[in-house]
Image: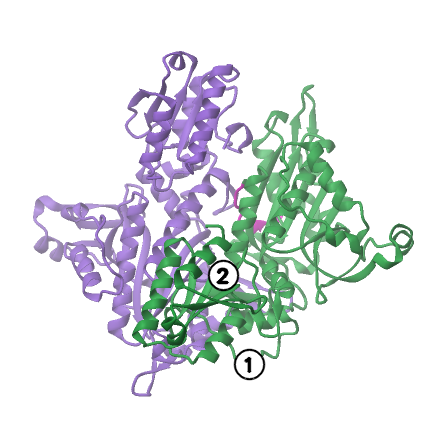
Chain colours: A green, B purple
Amino acid sequence: MRLSRYFLPVLKETPAEAQIASHRLMLRAGMIKQASAGIYSWLPLGYKVLRNIERIVHEEQARAGHIAMLMPTLQSADLWRESGRYDAYGPEMLRIRDRHERDLLFGPTNEELITDIFRGHVSSYRELPLTLYHIQWKFRDEIRPRFGVMRGREFYMKDGYSFDLDREGALHAYNRHFVSYLRTFERMGLQAIPMQAESGPIGGDTTHEFLVLADTGESEVFYDAAVTDIRMGARDIAYDDRAACQAVVDEFTALYARTDDTHEDAVFEAEVPEDRRRRGRGIEVGQIFYFGTKYSDPMGASVTDPEGHRVPVHMGSHGIGVSRLVGALIEAFHDEAGITWPEGVTPFHCGIVNLRQGDAATDAACEGLYAALAAKGLEPLYDDTEERAGAKFATMDLIGLPWRITVGPRGLKAGKVELTSRRTGESEELSPESAADRIAQIYGV
Amino acid sequence: MRLSRYFLPVLKETPAEAQIASHRLMLRAGMIKQASAGIYSWLPLGYKVLRNIERIVHEEQARAGHIAMLMPTLQSADLWRESGRYDAYGPEMLRIRDRHERDLLFGPTNEELITDIFRGHVSSYRELPLTLYHIQWKFRDEIRPRFGVMRGREFYMKDGYSFDLDREGALHAYNRHFVSYLRTFERMGLQAIPMQAESGPIGGDTTHEFLVLADTGESEVFYDAAVTDIRMGARDIAYDDRAACQAVVDEFTALYARTDDTHEDAVFEAEVPEDRRRRGRGIEVGQIFYFGTKYSDPMGASVTDPEGHRVPVHMGSHGIGVSRLVGALIEAFHDEAGITWPEGVTPFHCGIVNLRQGDAATDAACEGLYAALAAKGLEPLYDDTEERAGAKFATMDLIGLPWRITVGPRGLKAGKVELTSRRTGESEELSPESAADRIAQIYGV
């Protein structure tokens, strides 16, 4: 993308309303613009990151054998009356009446709707196990929306629903999600620690939250410092292998890690050596639940088991906060100058800064680099504007592309451009061809 | 995808509520399920088609230089009061009040919101031309929703907004959209004929609708039969080339083609030889508008021109009905047995039918084919269930994958499988390797 043809409205001033780094940086980097309280438009740069996160979630869900579909944003109130949650949900549910005076709501979650789909189409254990998921906009009428997309009212979320014949099958589905979530977050460059949590209005007693450690997190967390050393890495776990999935879950949950809802001082002190006890804050980016027959019972979602009996299915639901992750990533990856995107989610693979726009040789070298990168399937952001170098660097630092290639007449005389890491600030001089090759190598293309 | 692990709830009976082929077939093929009146869940098969259409729209918009972003579903009523459309819009607008008694609405279109973003960030002609678009769920509270996703209440639409300094620039943006829409629909295998139309509540006097001819279309259309012979084909039009874009528009609009809103009998008879006069019905799948300063004037969206004067920007808006296209495609591509997807949008590249599930050699051949196709980047749907052959064929015909590979013990003895075209019904015997190569060749991978 050529910056002269892009829409990147960066702000010089720090917006007064933004209290935390991610909100401030998303506004300053031209990623979002507030449309109304807690409701945002995603400007082009922000939308690209959102799509990258969505793509990673889809890919990891597919890998786990989960099936993508899409439920609507608006739901009938009647389904929620069936489960008993219509009245229970309270004022955070946005209730709507249509022109025929029928009650609708803007879905905050989809247990009722997916259970309705299931009961309408599935009747035998032979069709199980089944996990359906979607990524859709949801609404929660927060009384005091804040922190930008981290606690907005309209938010984008992946929610998946697992259906199994029995508790054992459902717990495998739970473990499968556990493993896939670890992979998903690690691909984004994030460490999200699974912690024991409370289930809230979803229900059930088996649940883990995945939290990114950050001072601005909304949850207080207590954990064994050793838990931060565990990674999924590249281990090759087959999702059908129950024992292998269970082993991963066991390893990640062996050490103490709880949110304040479930924290117990006595257990913490008994289990964790004093020098490893940590108390901090975390941003919740995912949560998994096993809640058995909480919805299938009242809504009559049952299947015939191998003996011919009708039994209610065992369900779980499993969420990832897709739009919230954009904020969480920035909380985890920024410095004084701006955002420092990990390669997994960066909106552009690298920047190209032309130090003397209009100089024939410099322009030609930039165009050559641009074409070479595009030919490798990479997408650079080429700053081809008339801005002075300092402003171009400041914008690149602010929007946080992991790599910048700087092209100027002086370097070109020696056949060199400069490749700079946003994270470390380290630079290296090399030929334009080598710079393109290096970027391709970094992204594995 | 293995059918045994997929969620494809096909129906044997024809649902009574469905009046037209696309609605009937989408229900029968397990593509959608109604959630409430005019609101649908997209089951996995339907969702795949929707995503394919969305991807093609994104790719062609990017090619035309238009910039993707995303506006929220809910909008503030205040913006619509500024343009004067809040009261004008009538009962099709879904009006919502939040917990703080603020008026919101579920956006049916986004002229106001995009104009607000523009005026907040763009102030000079140097930043023009600019076209921003998004693909987002919208809502129109149809008094009598029907025809499934063709006339639903919650629908998925691409709407793009062009901003230019003057009328001439804006008309080029209009022409660029014209060309890109032709390419978009042709990539889906569809012929959508641009016709003179009325602008309705969007405003302006320059507008074309793109219509797919179909008996079930909601619009009556009048056209010169010769217009159906024109195609974009592979012509290489540069989107910056104003004359080249204009020439395409001139060619496609030279012949009479109008909806009943703009049709004039006298002109029709004067311009079209009697044997080429056609009267039929069409499904609207896209519409482009140039409306000048209708929104920029009242909302104060202006830029400084090269002489330093503040002038309101010239705008256009340009829509493609993404969810509606799924229905329109089926209206155009089906037969007695089911859907006949064009290759451009098919949910799976081909089907594999195992005629004797459980037979070691047949299973192995199917698995080999499945792996070979996947290795080429293709996605087959492998019917690995215990159903009898007749039922498997009926399901494949119903869901309409363009190609089916049938694998059975008898053919395998001669080293052959059967490759069948869904469109023509023609079959050919060839080796499994050749069948995989043929499919790859068809899809150009």
- The chain containing the residue under callout 1 comes to A
Q: Mark 2: which amino acid?
A: Pro
Part of the protein shown in magenta:
A68-77
For the point 41% across and 64% down, the residue is: A431
Q: Is residue A269 left or right of residue A349?
A: right
Crowding at dot 1, Cα within 10 Å, few <14 / some 14-19 / many 20+, comes out as: few
Q: Is residue A70 left or right of residue A87?
A: left
B369 or A354: nearer the viewer:
A354
B438 or A439: nearer the viewer:
A439
Residue wearing tag 1: A13
Q: Position of residue B321 (x, y in %)?
A: 38, 52
For the point 47% across and 63% down, the residue is: A350
- Membership of B267 in magenta stretch: no
- The chain containing the residue under callout 2 comes to A
Q: Could you tell me which secondary element the residue under label 1 belongs to?
A: loop
Disc number at residue B444?
Answer: none
Q: Is residue A87 above or below residue B114?
A: above
Callout count: 2
Q: The C terminus of chain B appears in which quarter of the rendering?
A: top left
Q: Position of residue B365 (x, y in %)?
A: 45, 21
Instruction: Give the mark nearer the N terminus: 1 vs 2.
Output: 1
The answer to whether mark 1 and mark 2 are in CB contact below 8 A is no
Q: Is residue B77 above or below residue B1?
A: below
Residue wearing tag 2: A347
